[in-house]
Image (cartoon, helix red, strand yellow):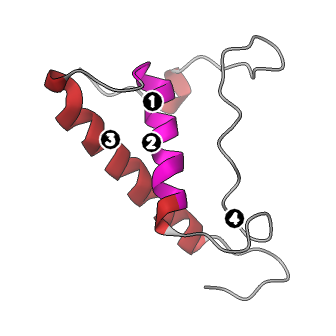
């Protein structure tokens, strides 16, 4: 599969408009969520990968790539949260 630039992707509409996008992944940044644990990050990553892939539990032949995607999303999420600077809060 070739790589796709973000500018090439169509704009997604939210569930308010079409019912297609998942909106139940909670905000993990302070002050919305004062304490974020690795389990919170992994749960959000798992929910995201499930939604994008369309699999709640992938078949055995897709398990490895599914798990790798969850780990990659969790790592990117942790990096994002560690780098965010929220006004009024000290940097982490």
Distance between the alpha carbons at the discs numbered 3 and 4: 22 Å
Instruction: Report x, y in % for residue 11.
Output: 66, 20
Segment colored magenta:
40-55
Q: Residue at x 33, y 51 (%)?
A: 71
Q: Is residue 5 above or below residue 16?
A: below
Does 45 lie within the magenta span? yes
Which disc, if any, is residue 17?
none
Which disc, if any, is residue 50?
1
Q: Mark yes or no: residue 82 visible.
A: yes
Crowd class of label 1 (few under 14; some 14 to 19; many from 20; radius 10 Å): some
Q: Secondary structure at mark 4?
A: loop
Comparing labels 2 and 3, the label whose residue is closer to the camera: 2
The residue singled out by tag 3 in the image is 69
The residue singled out by tag 2 in the image is 46
Q: Mark yes or no: residue 77 visible.
A: no
Picture quadrant of residue 54: top left
Outermost residue to the left:
61
The residue singled out by tag 4 in the image is 29
Say whether disc 3 or disc 4 marks the residue closer to the N-terminus.
4
Picture quadrant of residue 33: bottom right
Q: Is residue 58 above or below residue 32?
A: above
Labels 1 and 2 touching (C-beta < 8 A)? yes
Going by the image, does 11 lie left or right of 31? left
Say whether disc 2 or disc 3 marks the residue closer to the N-terminus.
2
Distance between the alpha carbons at the discs numbered 2 and 4: 18 Å
């Amino acid at each position: 599969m070739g790589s796709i630039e973000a500018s090439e992707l169509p704009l997604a509409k939210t569930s308010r408009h079409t019912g297609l996008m998942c909106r139940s992944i909670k905000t993990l940044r302070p002050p919305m969520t004062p304490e974020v644990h690795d389990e919170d990050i992994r749960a959000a990553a798992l929910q995201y990968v499930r939604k994008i892939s369309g699999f709640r539990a992938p078949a055995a032949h897709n398990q490895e790539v599914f798990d790798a995607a969850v780990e990659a999303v969790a790592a990117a999420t942790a990096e994002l949260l560690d780098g965010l600077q929220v006004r009024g809060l000290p940097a982490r």
